[in-house]
Amino acid sequence: MSPRHILILGGTTEARELAALLAARPDLRVTTSLAGRVSRPGTVEGDVRIGGFGGAEGLADWLRAEHVDHLVDATHPFAESITANAVRAARSAAVQALVLRRPGWQPGPGDRWHDVASLDEAAALLPSLGRRVFLTTGRLGLAVFAHLSDLHFVARSVEPPEPPMPPHIEVLLARGPFTPSDESALLRDHRIDVLVTKDSGGTATSAKLTAARGLALPVVVVRRPPLPEGVDAVPDVAGVLERLALTP
Ligand code: NAP
């Protein structure tokens, strides 16, 4: 009997952890799909394919052609298009689909969080909260802040951003995980008075929230887009193993 084929839509720490666990099993074939956004994606166990599928139909074709048995969407909570495509493609190709979605961040005592629904809302709110902004929402969203010429931005991203972007900006190229003490030092060194983040969840990039709490800084939190109706979602890798009946 040929091994069950599992396609993981990746680009996250959890996707990499899942691939490592599943690729070690001889009864499975594991493929991780990456969008190809970062130039050095790091090591991923099992097979890897890179680049878009050409929408939901292209993904459905791929699922059929490669005889995929299970599709695990372990993409980032803000990767909205691929998640919508995955749901449609899995239905069309009659493949079992599961979404691995890590829980969002919640404020604790002393936090001064401002929830917004989009980067545009974050940009509209910023001038009322501070002058020196630490922006951690990713290089692709910088255009939304480009008109804020009175504010000074420190933007952190994995890959160098491209214009349009705000006129007063310092770019820090770095990839998590980060520690609370390093994040505190960064906020102090750059005299940051407001932080903007997506609600990515997880621990790799949450140290900035601890640091902001310690310095009593306001944080603008861009909340996640909702999951499509009716998807089967689990919060972690263990949930995927359980749902696929792969627990030891
Ligand atoms: P997106 O807007 O949902 O996707 C745009 C298009 O990119 C998709 O329609 C698809 O192209 C292609 N794509 C996305 N993820 C793919 C994957 N894993 N494998 C193959 N094709 C993929 O996604 P995004 O926000 O640009 O994110 C791209 C990737 O970066 C995701 O895999 C995500 O896990 C990772 N990431 C995103 C963020 C974020 O904040 N958005 C943060 C960290 C990591 P086709 O329609 O041609 O198939």
Image: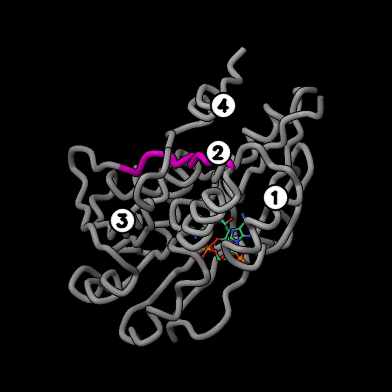
Residue at label 1?
Answer: 64
Residue at label 4?
Answer: 244
Mark 1 vs mark 3, foreground winner is 1
Q: Secondary structure at mark 4?
A: loop
Mark 2 vs mark 4, foreground winner is 2
Q: CA distance from mark 4 to mark 1?
A: 19 Å
Q: Which numbered disc flags the more N-terminal residue, 3 or 2?
A: 2
Q: Residue at x 44, y 86 (%)?
A: 167
Three-letter code for the amino acid on which mark 2 is drawn: Gln
Q: Which numbered disc flags the more N-terminal residue, 2 or 4?
A: 2
Q: Secondary structure at mark 1?
A: helix
Residue at label 2?
Answer: 96
Mark 3 vs mark 4, foreground winner is 4
Residue at label 3?
Answer: 223
Query: Is 109 inside the magenta-drawn segment?
Result: no
Mark 3 vs mark 2, foreground winner is 2
